[in-house]
Each structure stands twice: as structure tokens, then as C-alpha cells.
Image (cartoon, rainbow, N blue to C red):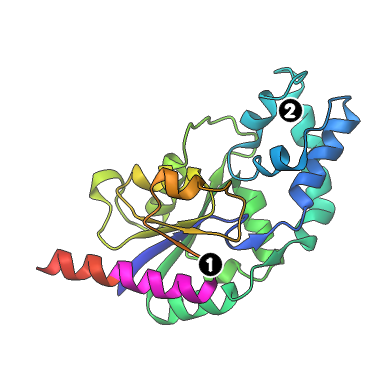
Amino acid sequence: MSAPAVIFDLDGTLVDPAGAITGGISAALEAHGITVPDEERLKSFIGPPLAASLKALPGVTEELVPKLIEHYRDGYMREGMAASEAYPGIRELLQDLRQQGHALAVATSKPGPQAERLLEIQGLRDSFDAVAGSAPDESIPHTSKGPIIASALEQLGLPSGEATPPGTVMVGDRRFDVEGAACHRIPCIGVTWGYALAGELEAEGAAVIVDSAEELAGQITRLTASAAATSSS
């Protein structure tokens, strides 16, 4: 690897779910007689593990969660993945990063097999050296994205935690990405085109926040070059 690794979140960072996630969750809740929260609350479900978000809703019992998740995922697999789209400039950014020698990975709370399938449908899977996600049934609980990022680093053949190589960068749209990156002393670039609430990324301590793929490319270069200069001095 000739350039530092860059790790990306998936939904809200690489791919716009285009309402597939919130619409699918709404349909699952309605089918099981649960009051559907407003759109802003539904959007907050994009990022953290779905089971944890569902459990916080009134009327959702521990026994009901697997049924809701199964209903949601059935519809998402049939229609939602194809309805999603890569954000503007993302394909070109990934191509450029690979040409520069960066190792690229995805770290997502979406179940691993589902993440792999979504990337394949969007024609992005070949851009990544590693894809790390949750267990298919979310049987391995995690309070942050730290363990998933650790898995991505392991797949890349890199150490994690305090030993994470200098210059490694995380890119995400939610506070969970910033928190998870911090577990490994990785700076996180926040993107504004995702699902963060106003001020969320700033409050969590994102290294920098960008508004476009072009700006993201520049900040990745800046952060990785700065880390390289520091480590060699």
C-alpha cells in the first residue's frame, strides 16, 4: 500500500438511499400496528444499528424487533437497493483515490452481506479492498462503530486502536462515524449530504466538514499528507 487507507460509511456517505430506508421502516411498522414516527425521527435511524433504533419506539417489544427487521429487509432487498444512487462525484472520487494508491474500505452498521449486495448493485464493489458490516441478525451488539472500523482495518491487514497507521482517514455523515473513528485515533471527515442533524458533526468533533465530493478529495489529500509529514519528521 503506497498511500494511507480511507474508510467510508455507506448509506448517507457513498450512497443516497432515496427514501428506501425510511419508507421501508414505515411499512414494517404499519404492518405490525406500530405508530410511525415523523420523517425526522425516521431519518435518525440511518446510521446506528436498526435494532437499537426500533427498540426505542413506543410499543416495540424485544420479541417484535426481529419481525420488524425481517419485514423491512425483505422490501429493501426487493426494491430499495436498486432505488438507491451513488452521490454526485463519488464514483470519480473512488477512482482517483485508487489511482493514487489508497487502500479503500467500507465500514457500515448495515449487515455485511447486505452491504456487499448494495455495493454490487451500485457498481461500486470493485472500488473497495474491504467491506465490514454488522452480523446479519445484529447478534453482535456494539455501542459505537469502533468494532466495525476495527474489522475493516483487519481486512486491510492493518492494526487498529492506538496502533492504527498515521494518515488513515474515516469519512461519514453521522456522529457514529466520528465516534467510531476516535476509538482508533482516526480523524473523521464529515459530509453534509447525508443524514446528520444540524450541528451533529461539529459537536462530535469531526476533523473537517465538506459539502461536495470535490471538497472531500481535497481534504483527504490534506489530512493524509499532513499525517505523513508528521510521522516522517
Residue drawn at (42%, 44%) of the image: 204
In percent of width and height, residue 87 lies at: 64, 68
Q: Which residues are magenta?
A: 212-224
Residue drawn at (40%, 52%) of the image: 206
User: 170 and 115: which one is in front?
Assistant: 170
Q: Amino acid at mark 2?
A: Pro
- Residue 1 in view of the camera: no
Q: Quadrant of the C terminus?
A: bottom left
In percent of width and height, residue 146 lies at: 42, 41
Q: CA distance from mark 1 to mark 2?
A: 36 Å
Please give the label number shown on residue 102: none
Please give the label number shown on residue 211: 1
Residue 179, placed above or below residue 230: above
User: 76 and 48: which one is in front?
Assistant: 48
Nearer the observer, disc 1 or disc 2?
A: 1
- Residue 86 in view of the camera: yes
Local packing at callout 1 (Cα closer than 10 Å; few below 14, some 14-19, many 20+) is few
Q: Amino acid at mark 1?
A: Asp
Most extreme residue toward the front, as rendered?
A: 198
Going by the image, does 82 lie left or right of 135?
Answer: right
* Contact check, label 1 and label 2, Cβ < 8 Å: no
Residue drawn at (57%, 72%) of the image: 90
Please give the label number shown on residue 66: 2
**Magenta highlight on residue 188:** no
Residue drawn at (45%, 77%) of the image: 98
Most extreme residue toward the left, as rendered?
A: 233
Of the two numbered discs 1 and 2 on the same chain, state the one appearing first in sequence. Answer: 2
